[in-house]
Image (cartoon, grey):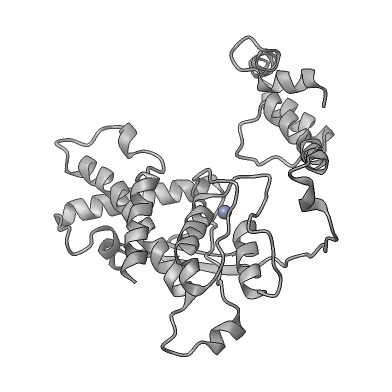
């Protein structure tokens, strides 16, 4: 890509050429048809829920070029070129499938969102429970996941474990391979993968394992996030009953972080439910995937790891 185009992609504001073209396309009333056609012509897969722009389409189009350029620069770099010396084996790591099956009955949900130390009036509990289910339903509708309705709403699906989590499990199950402990990807990790890696890295040393990293986390929550099994079936079978299990420890750390975040989220809904009158629309504080600050969650996870 010429430097000129790169500069155009980085331009921000209302006056740059891509924004002006976007505005013209949107005013035409044919935006989705025009963007779909461009995506089709450029052979790009575009997520249906994305709001498209010319900048996004061009960035997607030049992704391969960008990665090849990065590898070329590594090859020419005196400091980094050693990574490319020697021989590479290309190994295809099979996708790991997993089942997610959750029943959102009041009996299952209320003890989690209102733990014993946090009593609340029954009507407040039910209001918060209803709010949570409505938000879950809205999120499921947005990504076209069917929630089983009936007396107890239920989420049930078979999904693939995310790529970086699959790689983490694969390398832990194949310790004879000595990989570079950084998984490069074109996308940042989601909230689930980020929490899994943080939780794993906190206990890795105590299991004599190396830490693994990704390039960062965009913190978005996906309903289709299955937690992988980090140990293979054979590794599980070799464990003695008294042995600590890596999976158990990692999941415990994740639950500590996620429940702290959930508590902050429920608190916001509870404040609204207990308020003098319920607003017509969601307050800014109670909307979206509000989560506790990452630092606070990590502190709690570290404290739990230290208690082990
Ligand atoms: Zn992920």
Q: Is residue 279 above or below residue 128?
A: above
* Residue 282 visible in the shown view: no
Q: Position of residue 74 (x, y in %)?
A: 78, 42
Picture quadrant where residue 86 is located? bottom right
Q: Position of residue 220 (x, y in %)?
A: 50, 45
> As rendered, which of 122 and 245 lies closer to the eye?
245
Q: Quadrant of the N terminus?
A: top right
Q: Position of residue 66 (x, y in %)?
A: 77, 36
Q: Residue at x 34, y 53 (%)?
A: 299
Q: In screen coordinates, is 105 left or right of 34?
A: left
> As rendered, which of 275 and 10 lies closer to the eye?
10
Q: Quadrant of the C terminus?
A: bottom left
> As rendered, which of 21 and 205 lies closer to the eye?
205
* Residue 203 visible in the shown view: yes
Picture quadrant where residue 30 is located? top right
Q: Residue at x 43, y 71 (%)?
A: 249
Q: Quadrant of ligand 1?
A: bottom right
Q: Is residue 253 above or below residue 57?
A: below
Q: Residue at x 66, y 12 (%)?
A: 16
Q: Position of residue 192 (x, y in %)?
A: 50, 55
Picture quadrant where residue 6 is located? top right
Q: Is residue 188 above or below residue 304?
A: above
> As rendered, which of 181 and 23 lies closer to the eye?
181
Q: Is residue 40 above or below residue 256?
A: above
Q: Residue at x 56, y 48 (%)?
A: 143
Q: Residue furthest top?
A: 15
């Amino acid at each position: 890509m010429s430097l000129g185009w790169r500069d155009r992609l980085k331009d921000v504001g209302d006056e740059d050429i891509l924004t002006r073209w976007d505005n013209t396309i949107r005013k035409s009333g044919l935006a989705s048809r025009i963007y779909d056609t461009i995506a089709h012509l450029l052979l790009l897969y575009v997520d249906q829920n994305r709001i498209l722009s010319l900048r996004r389409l061009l960035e997607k189009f030049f992704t391969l070029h960008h990665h090849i350029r990065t590898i070329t620069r590594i090859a020419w770099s005196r400091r980094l070129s050693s990574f490319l010396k020697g021989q590479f084996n290309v190994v295809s790591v099979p996708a790991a499938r997993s089942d997610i099956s959750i029943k959102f009955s009041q009996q299952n949900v209320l003890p989690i969102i209102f733990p014993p130390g946090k009593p609340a009036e029954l009507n407040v509990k039910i209001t918060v429970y209803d709010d949570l289910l409505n938000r879950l339903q809205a999120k499921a509708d947005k990504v076209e996941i069917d929630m089983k309705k009936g007396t107890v709403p239920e989420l049930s699906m078979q999904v693939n474990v995310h790529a970086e989590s699959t790689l983490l499990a694969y390398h832990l199950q194949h310790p004879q391979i000595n990989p570079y402990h950084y998984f490069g990807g074109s996308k940042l990790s989601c909230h689930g993968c980020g929490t899994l890696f943080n939780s794993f890295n906190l206990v890795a040393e105590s299991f004599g394992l190396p830490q693994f990293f990704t390039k960062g986390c965009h913190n978005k929550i996906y309903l289709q996030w299955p937690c992988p099994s980090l140990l293979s079936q054979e590794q599980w079978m070799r464990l003695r009953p008294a042995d600590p299990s890596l999976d158990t420890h990692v999941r415990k750390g994740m639950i500590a972080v996620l429940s702290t975040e959930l508590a902050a989220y429920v608190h916001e809904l509870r404040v609204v439910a207990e308020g003098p009158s319920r607003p017509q629309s969601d307050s800014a504080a109670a909307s979206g995937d509000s989560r506790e600050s990452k630092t606070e969650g990590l502190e709690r996870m570290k404290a739990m790891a230290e208690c082990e």
